[in-house]
Amino acid sequence: MLGINFSFMMAETIGGKGLSERKIEDIKEKAAQAVSEIKQRKWPELQFMDLLKDDTSAVKDEARRLNGVSENFLILGIGGSALGPKCILEALSPFHNISKKPKVFIYDNVDPSTLDCIFKNIDIKKTAVNVISKSGGTGETAAGFKIVYEKMKKALGGRAEEMFVLTTDPGKGDLRRLANEKGFASLPIPPGVGGRYSVLSSVGLLLAEIIGVDSGDLLKGAADIHDRCLKDEVWENPALMTACLCYLMDREEGRGIDVLVPYSDRLRSFSEWFCQLWAESLGKLGMGLSPYPSVGTTDQHSQMQLWMEGPENKVVIFLRVEDYGVDFQMPHGFDDLPGMNYLSGHTLSELIKAEEEATELALAKIGRPNMTITIPRIDAYHLGQLFYFFEIMTAFVGFLYGVNPFNQPSVEESKRLTFGIMGRPGFEAKKKEVEEARGKKTIFKL
Amino acid sequence: MLGINFSFMMAETIGGKGLSERKIEDIKEKAAQAVSEIKQRKWPELQFMDLLKDDTSAVKDEARRLNGVSENFLILGIGGSALGPKCILEALSPFHNISKKPKVFIYDNVDPSTLDCIFKNIDIKKTAVNVISKSGGTGETAAGFKIVYEKMKKALGGRAEEMFVLTTDPGKGDLRRLANEKGFASLPIPPGVGGRYSVLSSVGLLLAEIIGVDSGDLLKGAADIHDRCLKDEVWENPALMTACLCYLMDREEGRGIDVLVPYSDRLRSFSEWFCQLWAESLGKLGMGLSPYPSVGTTDQHSQMQLWMEGPENKVVIFLRVEDYGVDFQMPHGFDDLPGMNYLSGHTLSELIKAEEEATELALAKIGRPNMTITIPRIDAYHLGQLFYFFEIMTAFVGFLYGVNPFNQPSVEESKRLTFGIMGRPGFEAKKKEVEEARGKKTIFKL
């Protein structure tokens, strides 16, 4: 079971820059209200909590069908529609494409160079394509879909549609219309589940099944931590406590950047997934926290100088893995060299865990707050727990700030301006705005 | 040639939250002093500037030798010793391992699970190993080296050493001693060149040659931008101007987070490389900037909400690519759908460039400062320019703040504590410190 240790957030342990227990007591009621908002389902977007009870048979059937007709699996999606599957792939099947089948490609951009690489590495006739967009109208996803579909049509003619599955809203949007009218297979994303809260829906589960992971294990892990994450009492609820700590560190101490550092290469994408969840949910009204992606031990040689001696505006959240599932002992080679002999006889997992613990303490010693989330091992069950813990925790933080953690109103203007440049009917005024801006931009160039 | 456009950093264009020309005029002299510190070579660590004139024949010979005896190329290194090569690999040979030889693996951690994956995917007898550590004493790199060397020894016996090349200081350290005493091949990292400024040394150049990239092109690109980056006049020097803008935005406007957003999947690792350079060089004395890694268009669906509406503490630096080298036209499929038909007939590179321009303007319209670095295309020549531009620019920023941009003093304590946990002789007091801290950490757990 996932656990947290927040000793190094507290004044009792790290001194004046830590939080007092009093501060936590002071927001206990506010915290309990946040729990109540969730329990009472005040927001339709809390539907992501219902995913835990979902029947996975439709996803399993679809995975079986697609794996039967293909050697490659191509996801077209962006944002939450890509990061969840990417995270599952890298955590549960690292180095997947080098030796395993089906090969998996996630096209989460409109970079022509990447699409070219994908096409050069797949036989399109043997490629299953999962188009993922909650709204069904995501421009980047539509762009990839149009190109891939045409290529498939040329290769397979009337059988092209069979190679696709559209993952989208069950009732509306362009992709749903295509599923209804042109006979594409489809999987639903429930109406209340936003992109960044969708990893435990068919968005993430289909990919899991495609690569041989039992999607039920992801859901079971999440379900098993559900009750703990909904306790009213902050001192008994790890998600609520983490939310309160991040909130207080920002409000009381000006520490608004939260660095997430899993000590595992397999959780590198989990950091990215977290950043999207946190940034879109909490970057609101000029308030809010900035997430920061990291990975240990690697970033001890990249970011740690900044955590230790840079501006006092960060909280470091370690993610510690207890059992790596495999290990290597360091042999007694080069024992005459002082930089090498102390390692002999130890294992890599001892070393990675020692570095994690040492980095916690190095920060704590100079009063830089940090906390640790621990999971026993990286498997579908515990990954499901991590996803769900962070989703609930993010909602709590939003409620503490009084912002809506489920919308993302500020990404719209860039879309409208893009429509203007691309000549979409109805956006002529935006086109003009871009052209005027171009004129202004001629001065400050070097 | 690389260019910058900083119109959307300026009050003249984006209004009150931008900088006035006056502010730039006011630090012109300070800026010119920074140039003079570099020109006069006041710091031995400026030796990275001499790399541009290096003869690449030793690197080419070594690459030829290793490619002759191997099918895989494994780098053991961390921080600057890994990020530079990783960046070259992903920018210049994307999707490398799926279809190209030699397969390249970069082990930049001590995660046992990753090493297990690497071993499962290579024949060790056909694997060239590049151990990279400037000091020769990096713990993580030593750990990997010990394990890989033993495995090689078991497989090849007396021929094991032939499969290695040690990239390290030419005169000192454990790796140098091994090269001198045990006959390992080696390549030098000049004494004044620190890890994060080493990409244009044999650290990055060997990997370039291994994957068939002419390392001379990287150096030529850098050399061709050298003179522009050393002009005394800030209005003529793009590196100095960028440094001044970032410095002023932090000092005058409290915008201390610099988000780098290349609009290219191939430059995703360049964002990471930049973050290491910036974090270790400038995260000093409680001052300094925090870099932030990003990639467009992907992170428009991940971070943009935060850039637009989150705390007013960020500057967004776009990296725009003019020519992607390949393109795809979007066909007229699904033209009855309003979310798809406006794309028909346009190309992906039109779309990705439109989104980049739209995002610049969306930020500018609400007074959120941003600037754009433009490169004509992604090839070795322009990647060399990007590396060098950012290295010089980072040094300038350090000089403007009055910090040493070449050391990283605060990463040492975590190393000492790790030595304590691992039982390295001489670090018994650190071991005790860790044990005492463990005692204190029992309280705040959930």
Image: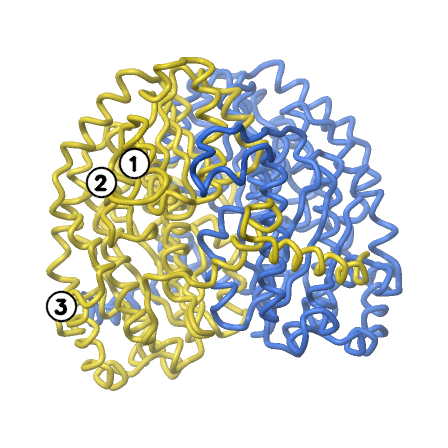
Chain colours: A yellow, B blue
Q: What residue type is labelled 1?
A: Leu
Q: Disc 2: which chain? A: A
The relative height of residue A136 versus residue A280 in the rendered view (above or below) is above
- Helix or strand or loop: what does disc 3 sit on? loop
Residue tagged by mark 2? A380
Q: How far apart are marks 3 and 2 (CA)?
A: 29 Å
Residue drawn at (83%, 47%) of the image: B225
- The reply to whether callout 1 and callout 2 are in contact (CB within 8 Å) is yes
Residue tagged by mark 1? A92
- Quadrant where the image shows the C terminus of chain B: bottom left
Q: Where is residue A424 in the image (x, y as percent from the top left)?
A: 55, 46
Residue tagged by mark 3? A40
In the image, are marks 1 and 2 on the same chain?
A: yes
Q: Disc 3: which chain? A: A
Q: Where is residue A133 in the image (x, y as percent from the top left)?
A: 36, 42
Q: Position of residue B418 (x, y in %)?
A: 41, 55
Residue B197 in sight: yes
Q: Nearer the viewer, residue B41 or B2?
A: B2
Q: What residue type is labelled 3?
A: Gln
